[in-house]
Amino acid sequence: MPFLARLIQDNEKIAAYSFIHSMATTLGMSIYEDVSVIIASETAEDAFRNYGVGGVISKDQKKQYRILSQN
């Protein structure tokens, strides 16, 4: 986090930010997905965890993404 270190210049705040970010990532990978399945299962026919989207992005799709991301 060199950019953050130069921006904040306070090691305690950087450590706190790093800890909070780590916790949010951990929660996102474990709890939020389970909660989403619980909520979706009330109304949806199917609800999945760890669902693999699969597929391949075509060259035209990549080109369109580049165009949209530049604007």
Image (cartoon, rainbow, N blue to C red):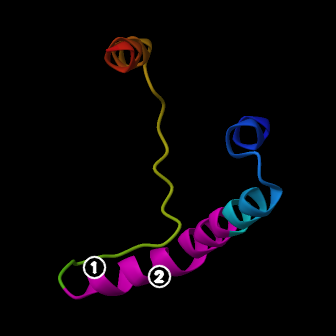
Q: Does the magenta stretch include residue 65?
A: no
Which residue is identified by label 1?
40
Q: Residue furthest front?
A: 9
Residue 25 sits inside the magenta stretch: yes
Amino acid tagged 2:
Asp
Give the residue drawn at x 47%, y 38%.
55
Residue 2: x and y, percent? 79, 37
Left/right of residue 7 with respect to residue 11 in the rendered view:
left
Q: How crowded is mark 2: few (under 14 residues within 10 Å), some or many (20 or more)?
A: some
Task: Say which amino acid is labelled 1.
Answer: Ala
Mark 1 → mark 2, Cα distance in angstroms: 10 Å
Q: Is the magenta stretch mostly helix, strand or loop?
A: helix
Q: Is mark 1 on a helix, strand or loop?
A: helix
30 left or right, relative to 61: right
Question: Hey, which quadrant is residue 64 in on the image?
Answer: top left
| Earlier-in-chain disc, 1 versus 2 | 2
Residue for badge 2: 34
Q: In which quarter of the image is residue 22?
A: bottom right
Q: Tell me where residue 16 sits by quadrant.
A: bottom right
State the extent of the magenta-drawn residues as a range: 20-42
Q: Is mark 2 on a helix, strand or loop?
A: helix
11 versus 3 height, above or below: below
